[in-house]
Amino acid sequence: MQFELWLSRWKLIPDGSPFVTHTSQRLPVKTSIDGIKAMLKITGDQKEKRGNALMAWWAGNGAAQIISHESAAMLLERATGPACQFRFHIVIIHLKFD
């Protein structure tokens, strides 16, 4: 997997097992400076890259907060706890009915 470049660049510590989706590679991480739990996502898929840019532009409004974003890689907040799950559920309902 291609994680080493981004782990070094963004000073990240692996915090779980990597997994692959049909469009990306993901790795749970923590930031080395303040221990924030995040998800490192790497993609080569053009639609995913456009989606990553859109999420960065949204700046956490209705989507996960983007900590860092560059080309094919994105570092986003990791959904943990009931507050994140509730926010995700509200976004899904909004997308279904709008």
Image: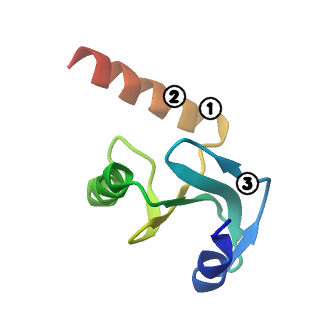
Q: Is residue 28 above or below residue 71?
A: above
Amino acid on which the number 1 mark rests in the picture: Pro
Quadrant location of residue 9? bottom right
- 2 or 3: tag closer to the N-terminus: 3
Q: Name the residue that disc number 2 marks.
A: 86
Q: Which mark is residue 18?
A: 3
Q: Is residue 77 above or below residue 13?
A: above
Quadrant location of residue 34? bottom right
Q: Position of residue 95 (x, y in %)?
A: 29, 24
Q: Quadrant of the N terminus?
A: bottom right
Secondary element at image label 1: helix
Q: Name the residue that disc number 1 marks.
A: 82
Which residue is at a point 58% across and 80% down the rendered structure image? 10
Q: Position of residue 44 (x, y in %)?
A: 44, 60
Q: Position of residue 13 (x, y in %)?
A: 75, 72
Which residue is at a point 30% across and 60% down the rendered structure image? 53
Secondary element at image label 2: helix
Of badges 2 and 3, nearer the viewer stands: 3
Which residue is at a point 47% across and 32% down the rendered structure image? 88
Q: Position of residue 39 (x, y in %)?
A: 61, 56
Decide which of 46, 62 is in the foreground and name it. 46
Amino acid on which the number 2 mark rests in the picture: Phe
- Mark 1 near mark 2, Cβ–Cβ under 8 Å? yes
CA–CA distance in space, label 1 to label 2: 6 Å
Looking at this rendering, what residue extends furthest in the right direction?
A: 16
Which residue is at a point 66% across and 37% down the rendered structure image? 81
Q: Is residue 66 above or below residue 31?
A: above
Secondary element at image label 3: loop
